[in-house]
Image (tube, rainbow, N blue to C red):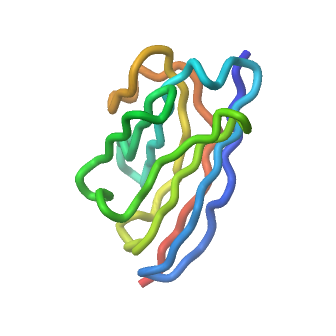
Amino acid sequence: QVQLVESGGGLVQAEGSLRLSCVVSGGTFSTYAMGWFRQAPGKEREFVATISRSDEGTYYTDSVKGRFTISRDNAKNTLYLRMNSLKPEDTAVYYCAVRSGGPSDAVNEYTYWGQGTQVTVSS
């Protein structure tokens, strides 16, 4: 059973920064593509960023390009999301997820999910 645990969320002012982490256990981290998703109150879960197994490919939703950076450390079984220049509209619960195969922006293509970490950006 693959387990994911996110951390690093919190309350930050607009234009501030946060770094989210996601530790994966119970599987072979280096064989998984990984993704970050978010869900705001009353909205559907949406794609934020994804990264390939060996870090050669990263993809972002347009609204976070140039502000967010996804990365991974396969030696530590850890996925990261560096978030700069945060905006109030970035407020959401952020989830990391695992899929076999290549990176993807589709929620339903991911097999395992973490419990989420809350990010709140005040104006």
Q: How many marks?
A: 0
Indicate the position of residue 1 as horizontal and vertical percent values: 73, 15
- Quarter of the image with the C terminus in it: bottom left
Query: Would residue 43 appear left or right of 9 to someone viewing this image?
Result: left
Query: Would residue 81 appear left or right of 6 to someone viewing this image?
Result: left
Indicate the position of residue 77 as horizontal and vertical percent values: 70, 34
Q: Residue at x 64, y 25 (%)?
A: 29
Q: Residue at x 44, y 15 (%)?
A: 101
Indicate the position of residue 56 as horizontal and vertical percent values: 41, 34
Q: Can you tell which quarter of the image residue 63 is in?
A: bottom left
Q: Residue at x 56, y 67 (%)?
A: 18
Q: Residue at x 23, y 52 (%)?
A: 62
Q: Is residue 116 above or below residue 19?
A: above
Indicate the position of residue 99 as horizontal and vertical percent values: 50, 21
116 or 79, nearer to the observer: 79
Query: Would residue 96 appear left or right of 88 to someone viewing this image?
Result: right
97 or 33, nearer to the observer: 33
